[in-house]
Amino acid sequence: MLQILCLALCGLLPGTRADPGALLRLGMDILNHEVQSAMEESHILEKMAAEAGKKRPGVKPIKGITNMKVKDVQLPVITLNFVPEVGIFQCVSTGMTITGKSFMGGNMEIVIVLNITATNRLLQEEETGLPVFKSEGCEITLVSVKTNLPSNKMVNKFLDSTLHKVLPGMLCPAIDAVLVYVNQKWARLSDPMPVGQMGTVKYALMSTPATTASHIQVDFSPEVTQQKGKTIKLAEDGGPLEIPGGYAEGSSQLLLSAALLTAELALLQKSFNMDIQDQTIGELPPQTTVTLAGFIPEVAEAYPKPKPVVTQIRINKPPKVTLKTGKSLLHFHGSLEIFTTRRRGKPPMSLFLLETHFNLKIQYSVQGNRLQMDTSVDRLLSLTRGSSSIGNFNEEELTGYITDYLQEAFVPVVNDVLRVGFPLPDLLAIDYNLAELHIAENALVLDLKLD
């Protein structure tokens, strides 16, 4: 029975991926910056203070005080702490002055220092799938109260009653208003972002973000889609993503898996195909049959007179990215076919076709919040003759020539194609241009910085 149940459950999940294609660890550095920025951008305490003295429909005036006004709101100091499996505990320390006419007939002035505390629960919104903070349990705690009113039981009772009536209704909405600003910075996270004209990348959430005692972890299941709508499935042979040790406490990192980078490069596969007709390429010798004859004597026998050659490169399999600590490679499997030009009106004649497997070293950078790659030849791993019109020859004699050819002729085209860049998650106004990049096991790590 258990075996049947297992088979049934497994059958429901044929295409599921156990590991995220990208992972974001949000430390307190970025979260504190975003909440503080939201408080400053919203000017919410000042707005609440300005509204406090206005008459509002359905709101009864506070007994014992008239012409109430709030002024001199102090710049808030925000303290955040992670609450495991919940979200963030937030404390906003500020101060202000309340003025008005008291029940005793004179001008009243109350100078208060207080803390606003609330738990900001982190959820995943059902309709949009986006992360969202929602506050709960807001409380106001008075740190100090100073007033020009005489100190007696009646006045103290009045102050206590007045402040407990005024402050929660005036200040607790400020927490919700600030979270509106923070939540807006998640709003574009799931928007498909273009990779040139070839397709899009969408950073869909894999599950509700998980809060620990030191960070919030956001697991992504990225969707890489071709222009015609076909989704490129991420490979599952890369292993789990893990944050390497050694990063400062409270810092934030974004990890991009080799599987995600490979899927994104698959969008560009056709752009790496090329026909090269230039006779002069970089530091290479002239692209003629004479040059080839220096490596393959059979070429001279077939073409005793010099003829220009044309090279056709086709990438037959999707490119693959591998990431090992400190080094990243881009694997290409393809064919390299060399043709001689013929008289006008006749198609070029194929000399030979070689099946190739070679690696390019990748250097990563970020520009305009897009991941950039720059490549150079690492190794030519295999060179196998597929067909030949000049008879049998030892293709290994071409290893050095083909390696130089790839570096001088193919790599510049690859790097030009890669300038399109790959989009990074659009959330919390993170400036990826400030990130420090490290190549770890199976992951590219962006160590996020604020300045």
Image (cartoon, rainbow, N blue to C red):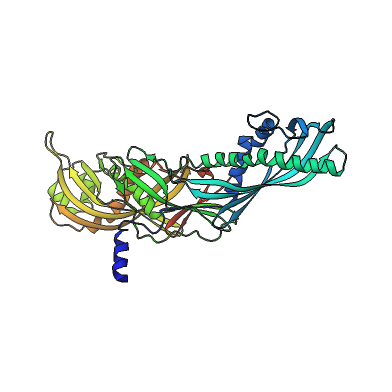
Residue depicted at 34% across the width and 47% down the height: 265
Quadrant of image for the N terminus: bottom left
Question: Which residue sits at x=42%, y=52%?
Answer: 206
Q: Position of residue 227 (x, y in %)?
A: 30, 40
Which of 221/100 is in front?
100
Instruction: Examine the image and state in which quarter residue 57 appears.
Output: top right
User: In the visual, does 73 lie left or right of 308?
Assistant: right
The reply, left or right, for residue 95 in relation to residue 417 is right
Front residue of 442/416: it is 442
Q: Decide if residue 451 is in sight here.
A: no
Judged left or right of residue 27, residue 422 is left
Question: Residue 230: where, in percent of width, then height?
Answer: 28, 45
Residue 413 appears in the figure: yes
Query: Number of labelled discs?
Result: 0
Q: Percent from the top left, x then y, of residue 285? A: 29, 45
Residue 229 at x, y percent in the picture? 29, 42
Q: Nearer the viewer, residue 108 or 304?
A: 108
Quadrant where the image shows the C terminus? top right
* Image quadrant where residue 38 sits: top right
Front-lying residue, 170 or 212: 170
Q: Residue at x 52, y 47 (%)?
A: 435
